[in-house]
Amino acid sequence: MNLESLREATRKQMPDKRWKHTLGVVETAIKLAKRFDGDPVKSELAALLHDYSKAWAIDRMEAIIREQRLSMDLLVYDKELWHAHVGAWAVQDEHGITDEEVLDAIRYHTSGRENMTKLDKIVCLADYIEPGRDYPGVSKIRELAKHSVEEALIAAFDSTIEVLIERGKRIFPLTVLARNDLIGQLKQSNNKIANGG
Ligand SMILES: Nc1ncnc2c1ncn2[C@@H]1O[C@H](COP(=O)(O)OP(=O)(O)O)[C@@H](O)[C@H]1O
């Protein structure tokens, strides 16, 4: 399947507002890939497909999670998390996408995870800072994203965790693990710099 028909198929899954957001994520992911030595081709593909199932009915997503045994523990957390796992399954099922790196970047774009790949980081961060995003703290995250994917993602996860706490919601633990891991990665790279390389 070529990129143009994937675009059309993806556009059909969502309302115009979500499609506009998707195009913003694509544009931002390509920029981040160029800035941080990522893979612009995979970044474009994963960004295009990241919200493939976002507008699907909750019942449809729940059925897929159960039938495909995607990640049963997901069901007790915010439904906003479901589309990422369902989307990774759907693009494989409907369009034969088999690149595990791309599928993982779709699957973990909302929560993050431990040991995020560069592609995971790029797609997740692009989703937080694409030009259409407007929420408290977004300009600080955009500023950080000019020099460090890790620092920007930590700030992004902080903002999500803060909102979840304010609203008294459960926190899906992968986001906490992702944040801890990114802090460790930053410490390591700072130590390397302090020790001369
Ligand atoms: N660790 C988490 N635990 C619970 N809910 C989460 C977590 N991370 C993200 N979410 C939920 O997912 C939402 C963001 O999902 P996202 O795919 O970025 O949707 P949108 O593109 O509509 O902002 C957050 O507002 C929050 O409700």
Image: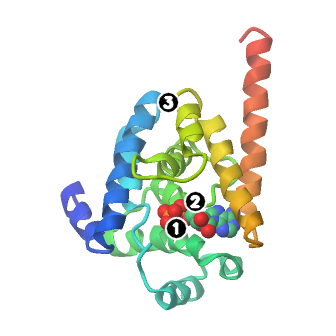
Residue neighbourhood size for the residue with mark 1, other residues' Cα within 10 Å, grouped as few (<14), some (14–19), many (≥20): many
Q: What residue lies at 57% left-to-right and 82% top-to-bottom? A: 65
User: What's the amino acid at mark 1?
Assistant: Ala
User: What's the amino acid at mark 2?
Assistant: Tyr
Figure quarter occupied by ligand 1: bottom right
Among numbered discs 1 and 2, the one appearing first in the sequence = 1
Q: Describe the element under mark 1 as helix, strand or loop.
A: helix
Residue neighbourhood size for the residue with mark 2, other residues' Cα within 10 Å, grouped as few (<14), some (14–19), many (≥20): many
Is the Cβ of the residue at disc 2 closer than 8 Å to that at disc 3? Answer: no
Q: Position of residue 45 (x, y in %)?
A: 35, 52
Quick check: 150 above or below 97?
A: above
User: What's the amino acid at mark 3?
Assistant: Phe
Is residue 53 or residue 143 the one in the foreground?
143
Q: Describe the element under mark 2 as helix, strand or loop.
A: loop
Does the residue tagged 1 have its C-beta within 8 Å of any atom of ligand 1? Answer: yes
Q: What residue lies at 59% left-to-right and 33% top-to-bottom? A: 144
Q: Position of residue 158 (x, y in %)?
A: 71, 50
Q: Which mark is residue 108?
A: 2
Is the Cβ of the residue at disc 1 closer than 8 Å to that at disc 3? Answer: no
CA distance for labels 1 and 3: 24 Å
Q: Which mark is residue 84?
A: 1
**In the image, is 14 to the left or to the right of 82?**
left
Quick check: 107 above or below 134?
A: below
Among numbered discs 1 and 3, the one appearing first in the sequence = 3
Q: What residue lies at 73% left-to-right and 31% top-to-bottom? A: 186
Quadrant of residue 153 within the rendered picture: top right
CA distance for labels 1 and 2: 7 Å
Q: Quadrant of the N terminus?
A: bottom left
Q: Which mark is residue 177?
A: none
Q: Describe the element under mark 3 as helix, strand or loop.
A: loop
Question: Which residue is labeled 3 in the image?
Answer: 36
